[in-house]
Amino acid sequence: MSTPVTSLRNLGPAFAAELARAGIHSAEQLRETGADAAYTRLLETGTRAHFIAYYVLHMALQGRPWNDCKGAEKDALRVTFDAIKAAAKPDKTGHATEIERILDQIGTGLRA
């Protein structure tokens, strides 16, 4: 039996859909994967990088309100978020983010 991702505090249907697109379909799978690896998978499958979404994921896995992330904890998460974002591998189309895919479609090419 698997528990829906939406059973975790702070995670609604839209976030669950993004996680499903990244191959994460249950709360158990998300816990096993961990916040950092799950967020990396989100970026690799085209989710736009957003710091709040990153720390909401961390707070959800701890069962804490999303706005409980403050001070030094938030600063430390920002450093990790920036590193994950910088290291995100492109998806199978060669784009690390959805905006890069769109920019490539309209002819501006991939960002260096």
Image (cartoon, rainbow, N blue to C red):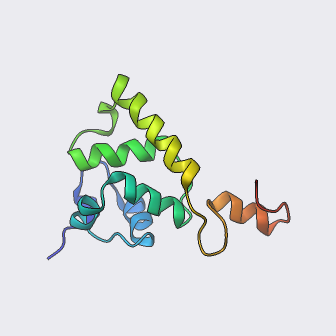
Name the outermost residue toward the left. 1
- Image quarter in which the N terminus is found: bottom left
Quadrant assignment, res 76: top left
Q: Position of residue 107 (x, y in %)?
A: 85, 65
Q: Where is residue 37 in the image (x, y as percent from the top left)?
A: 38, 58
Residue shown at the point (44%, 69%) measured from the top left = 22
Quadrant assignment, res 34: bottom left
Residue shown at the point (78%, 69%) measured from the top left = 105
Residue shown at the point (57%, 62%) measured from the top left = 89
Q: Where is residue 59 in the image (x, y as percent from the top left)?
A: 29, 42
State left or right for residue 78 relative to residue 35: right
In the depicted structure, whether residue 62 falls above or below residue 27: above
Quadrant assignment, res 11: bottom left
Q: Would residue 14 be seen by someone viewing this image from the given angle?
A: yes
Residue nearest the viewer, comparing 110 with 11: 110
Name the outermost residue toward the top. 71
Q: Position of residue 16 (x, y in %)?
A: 37, 63
In the depicted structure, whether residue 68 falls above or below residue 14: above
Residue shown at the point (58%, 48%) measured from the top left = 86
State left or right for residue 65 relative to residue 107: left
Residue nearest the viewer, comparing 34 with 14: 34
In the depicted structure, whether residue 3 falls above or below residue 72: below
Q: Would residue 70 be seen by someone viewing this image from the given angle?
A: no
Q: How many labels sit on residues?
A: 0
Name the outermost residue toward the right. 107
In the depicted structure, whether residue 7 falls above or below residue 91: above
